[in-house]
Amino acid sequence: MVQAINAALRRLPVPAVYLLAAVPGAWLVALAFTGGLGVDPVKRLERELGLLALQFLILGLAVTPLRRLAGISLLRFRRALGLSAFGYVLLHVAVWLALDMQFLWSQIATDLVRRPYITIGMAALALLVPLALTSTDRALRRMGAAAWARMHRLVYPATVTGGLHFVMVVKAWPLEPFLYLAAILALLALRLRRRPALARG
């Protein structure tokens, strides 16, 4: 079964992953234009785009544990998952700036200082920017594999920060944000537990 899954994944071209990743975002935009996002479409669009960003970040974190524990390799698609996550983060922030805040820069600056969940969210974006800018093979060659790998470990605090942002932004404290944060911490624990074992080997 695992061999069949990996064989199918090897036949899947990487550009197809970008296209598949864009489908939920395109569907949300279509719903926004047709009145399908409820009574507060801006807030709904903003939330769903942020949630997609977090989901793709979690998928990126799951690539290595999935290969180690289940033998399923998504390594070819890790860059596509990461860049798709970054794209959804940018869309999430753009909706907040343009549609929610309507480019009221003084109010935006005030919220950045006074609302911790916004500060945390912007910190996650700041951590992801250098990863997106160095996601090319050319950047890898220029930086060297070791330095590139060290920089790209920023994805760990970026994903945790994104999970915290989700927990803080939902005022009613439902279970869903905590499940996302728990999944992030569990995936990081799997990776951190594996590192010492590799070092001893």
Image (cartoon, rainbow, N blue to C red):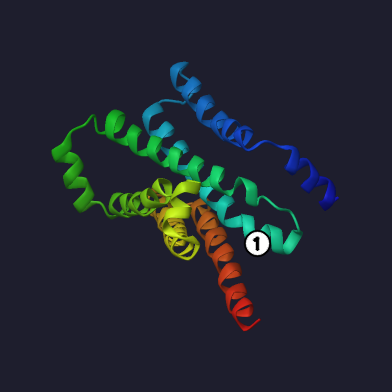
In the image, residue 149 above or below residue 29: below
Image quarter (top left, top right, bottom left or bottom right) of the C terminus: bottom right
Q: Residues within 10 Å of mark 1 (few under 14, many from 20)?
A: some
Q: Which one is in front, 157 or 97?
A: 157
The residue located at (63%, 38%) in the rendering is: 14
Instruction: Find residue 150 and report its horizontal and vertical position in percent.
Output: 45, 65
Instruction: Find residue 114 and report its horizontal and vertical position in percent.
Output: 20, 52
Q: Which one is in front, 49 or 34?
A: 49
Q: Is residue 135 visible?
A: no
The residue located at (58%, 68%) in the rendering is: 191
In the image, residue 120 above or below residue 147: above
Q: Residue furthest front?
A: 142
Secondary structure, mark 1, is helix
In the image, residue 13 above or below residue 147: above
Q: Which one is in front, 148 or 173?
A: 148
Give amino acid for label 1.
Pro
The residue located at (40%, 27%) in the rendering is: 41
Instruction: Find residue 46 and report its horizontal and vertical position in percent.
Output: 40, 35
Instruction: Find residue 149 and report its horizontal and vertical position in percent.
Output: 48, 62
Residue on which disc 1 sits: 65
State the count of labels. 1
Query: Quick check: 41 left or right of 18?
Result: left
Q: Residue furthest bottom?
A: 200
Q: Residue furthest left?
A: 106
The residue located at (58%, 49%) in the rendering is: 78
Query: Quick check: 90 left or right of 77?
Result: left
Q: Is residue 102 visible?
A: yes
Q: Residue furthest top?
A: 34
